[in-house]
Image (cartoon, rainbow, N blue to C red):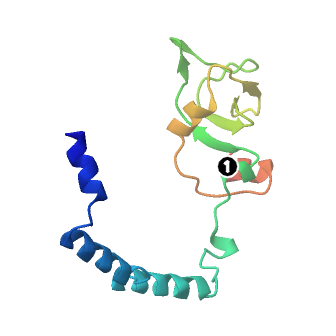
Amino acid sequence: MFRRIRRRRTEEPGELHRQHYETYVRMTGQVPPEVARMQAAQQLAESAPMVDDFLPAELRVPGHDQLEGRMMPWPWPIVLNGEVVACSACGAYRNWLILSTRDQVWLRCRAGHQQHEARLDTAWYNRHAGPADAHHETFEDCLRHLGH
């Protein structure tokens, strides 16, 4: 069996091998028309000037990393682990402002007392917060906007 294989390797290539080789030599250096069109389109795209097609600055919304914090009103009582959260200073248990800043959640009652709520986290805030309706420069501006 191995003799037959060696014999075939030493013999002259057949007609079919010769035709394949000639076709291969003719095709080297040729580029299919689809590839040529794609290369031309890519060169046009690369040579096109870059245009700033993003929104104007006054219409852009700042990202989470550009904000000091976020807050939302929460008119209902907050129940955590079966107990209603109440203000430690005045005992209020509803009409909260929930503030999320630096991976912490703070609760602010109507009287202006603030307390850190360790049982709430930023993920909880993100699940319950709706879209922002305004952005404010100062904390006081935001409090005025939310009616506190």
Q: Residue at x 43, y 81 (%)?
A: 38
> Is residue 95 among the parts visible in the rendering?
no
Q: Determine the image quadrant of residue 69.
A: top right
> Which part of the image, by quadrant, shows the N terminus?
top left
Q: Quadrant of the C terminus?
A: top right
Q: Quadrant of residue 3?
A: top left
Residue at point 40%, 82% (across, down): 31
Nearer to me, 121 or 40: 40
Counting from the top left corner in percent of width and height, residue 95 is at: 60, 33
* 131 left or right of 103 in image: left
Residue under the image location 63 percent in, 71 percent down: 59
State the residue at coordinates (24%, 40%). Answer: 2
**Compared with residue 120, is residue 145 higher up or lower down, i.e. above or below?**
below
Q: Can you say whether 35 is above or below 75 in the image?
A: below
Amino acid at pointer 1: His
Which residue is more in the foreground, 19 or 121? 19
In this view of the protein, can residue 82 be seen by the observer? yes
> Which residue position is annotated with label 1?
64
Q: x and y percent of residue 47 in the render?
A: 61, 87
Crowd around label 1: few <14 · some 14–19 · many ≥20 (10 Å): few
x, y percent for residue 105: 68, 30
Residue 108 image point, x, y percent: 71, 32
